[in-house]
Image: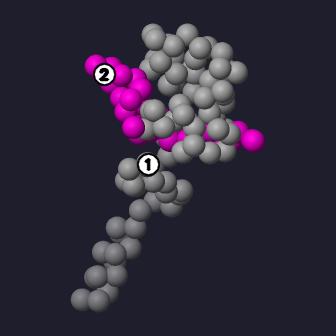
Amino acid sequence: MRFLSLIFLFSCVAEKGPLTYSLDGQRVLPATDRPEVVTFEYIQEKILVPKCLECHAWVNEPNEVNRRITPGAPDSSRLFRLMVNGRMPPRPAAPVETSELEIMRDYINQLTR
């Protein structure tokens, strides 16, 4: 019986690889189309233009976006906090998704002070 239990346990082992956690504490696998280094152009194309451009033309200007970000400190960044707490974009627009927030967090963390 022990032998069969061991076989069962080994057959249930997940694939090896990095395991990440979302902002809400859920285990998620890394996105396959996500770059290793998140650039301004990437967040602009994937998040800022679709979610913010309708009301905020400044999302096309890296300097204007970076004025609203504290490099290396997403939780201190005004732009990130507004996205996390759901104030931006305002309703009835769909909120920023958890995966998009994680990308924004990565971008801000990559910036140097």
Residue 62, quarter of picture:
top right
- Seen at 28% across and 82% down, the residue is 4
Q: Percent x, y for residue 91?
A: 30, 22
Residue 37, quarter of picture:
top right
- Seen at 66% across and 44% down, the residue is 72
Please indicate whether residue 90 sits to the left or right of residue 48 in the image: left
Please indicate whether residue 81 sits to the left or right of residue 97 in the image: right
Name the residue type under label 1: Leu
* Quadrant location of the N terminus in the rendered image: bottom left
Residue 36 makes an appearance in the image? no
Residue 91, numbered label: 2
Front residue of this view, candidates 11 and 91: 91
Name the residue type under label 2: Arg
Front residue of this view, candidates 27 and 2: 27
Residue 23, numbered label: 1
Residue 61, numbered label: none
**Considering the numbered disc 2 on the image, is that residue within a helix, a strand or a loop?**
loop
- Seen at 39% across and 37% down, the residue is 85
Q: Percent x, y for residue 26?
A: 37, 53
Please indicate whether residue 24 sits to the left or right of residue 102 in the image: left
Q: Percent x, y for residue 74?
A: 57, 42
Q: Which one is in front in this view, the residue at disc 2 or the one at disc 1?
A: 2
From which residue to which does the magenta span run?
Answer: 85-113
Residue 44 makes an appearance in the image? yes
- Seen at 66% across and 27% down, the residue is 67
Q: Is 44 above or below relative to 109?
A: above
Q: Percent x, y for residue 44?
A: 58, 21
**Considering the numbered disc 1 on the image, is that residue within a helix, a strand or a loop?**
loop
Front residue of this view, candidates 112 and 32: 112
Is the residue marked by circle 2 packed among few (<14), some (14-19), or many (20+) residues within 10 Å? few
